[in-house]
Amino acid sequence: MDSTYKVASPETMSDAQLAQLGSDANCSNAQECLEILTKRKDERAKQAESDRMRSENVRTARAELQGGPFGPPNEVSAVSADAHFIATSARADAGRIIKHLWIIFVLLPVVLGILFAILK
């Protein structure tokens, strides 16, 4: 028995095996093998195109940085999202921060002064 005709899923076969089975007139799954082979070639072509586009984007980004890496910002808004988040969270926590600072710098020294005065 030929090793090509062992029971195996067409998805696990190599391209050469799929091409051989697809061109075999006695293979009952010839059409399926050709479809899988075509799908693999399409996926490889899409991956190659994606890789080409990615390398092109990297090349253009590097070319832009060669002119000066600290150029003007490309953001649409005047304030970055990080700065906006920090400002809104600081605004929300401002009351709690002020309260704790008041306790540390005003109330604690007054209470300690009273305790030292009593214990003398």
Image (cartoon, helix red, strand yellow):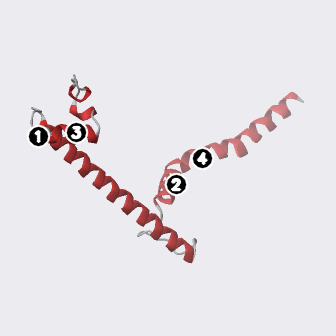
Mark pair 4, 3: CA separation: 69 Å
Ranked by sequence position, the earlier of labels 4 and 3 is: 3
Q: Alpha-carbon neighbours of circle 1 within 10 Å: few (<14), some, or many (≥20)? A: few
Find residue 18 and name its label: 3
Ranked by sequence position, the earlier of labels 2 and 4 is: 2
User: Residue 33 vs residue 71: left or right?
Assistant: left
State the SS at label 4.
helix
For the residue marked with disc 2, what is the amino acid?
Ile
Ranked by sequence position, the earlier of labels 1 and 3 is: 3
Find residue 31 and name its label: 1
For the residue marked with disc 4, what is the amino acid?
Ile
Mark pair 2, 4: CA separation: 14 Å
In this view, the mark in front (2 or 3): 3
Residue that badge 4 annotates = 97
Mark pair 2, 1: CA separation: 60 Å
Q: Alpha-carbon neighbours of circle 4 within 10 Å: few (<14), some, or many (≥20)? A: few
Relative to 97, residue 113 above or below? above
- The residue lying at 44 percent from left, 68 percent from top is 75
- Tag 4 and tag 3, C-beta contact below 8 Å: no
On-image quarter of the C terminus:
top right
Mark pair 4, 1: CA separation: 72 Å
Ranked by sequence position, the earlier of labels 4 and 1 is: 1
Percent from the top left, x then y, of residue 113? Answer: 81, 38
Q: Alpha-carbon neighbours of circle 2 within 10 Å: few (<14), some, or many (≥20)? A: few
Residue that badge 2 annotates = 86
For the residue marked with disc 1, what is the amino acid?
Gln
Task: Out of 10 and 25, give the one closest to the viewer.
Answer: 25
On-image quarter of the N terminus:
top left
Percent from the top left, x then y, of residue 69? Answer: 57, 71
